[in-house]
Image: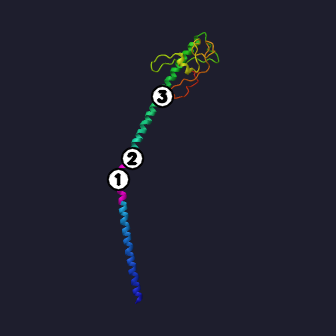
Amino acid sequence: MTWVWIVIAVVVVLAVVGLLVMAANKKKQEQRRTQAGELRTDAHAQSASVLDADRQARDAEADAARARAEAERAERQAAEAARARDMERATHEDQIREADRIDPDVDHRSDDYVPDAEPQRFDTQTGEPLEPDAQRGSTGFEQTPDQPAGHAPGQAPGQHAATREPLSDPLTDGQQPPQDTQNR
């Protein structure tokens, strides 16, 4: 009979332990439900900021696309302006070459012949032609009163300077113009 009481006591103890475990699990599940609810509430509260961040990102992408389109348009305009400038320079140089060909004081067949194709510079505010002294920075040498324009010091009239500094052009932003102008 003592065995029966021992088995009953073990069964009762197991039942009490089982009830305690179930109660603990139920309490733990309730705490997890409460915690999940709080997290969902916080997430819903942040949804407005997520939507705002999403809108800002879309706006920034649209701004970037507009800026890219504007940059492409500006690049096309700059390329067109550079082509027009090159055509004008070529026409100008052709006129200078023709004048040098006709001028008996210019040896245009010499190996070191370079046309004096430096274009006339103008004041950007008034539009009037600049004096040779004001153009000095573009040729790289100083002009003296007894010397014709476009000639280096010590160079005889009728001879042209063999080397020139390239024109600075804000459209090319420091890029050198093509040097192969004699093959045109």
Q: Which residue is mark 1?
A: 45
Within the image, what quadrant is residue 145 found in? top right
Q: Can you say whether 12 is above or below 62 in the image? A: below
- Image quadrant where residue 57 sits: top left
Q: Position of residue 45 (x, y in %)?
A: 35, 53
Q: Nearer the viewer, residue 134 or 5?
A: 134
**Numbered tag placed on residue 78 in the rendering:** 3
- The magenta-colored residue range is 37-55
On the image, the x and y values in percent for residue 78 come to 48, 28
Q: Which circle's residue, 1 or 3, is located before the other in the chain? A: 1
Q: Main secondary structure of the magenta part?
A: helix
Residue indicated by mark 2 = 53
Looking at the rendered image, the disc whose residue lies closer to the viewer, 3 or 2, is 2
Amino acid type, label 3: Ala
The reply, left or right, for residue 44 in relation to residue 99 is left
- Residue 46 inside the magenta-drawn segment: yes
Q: Quadrant of residue 113?
A: top right
Q: Residue at the spot x=46%, y=33% of the render? A: 72
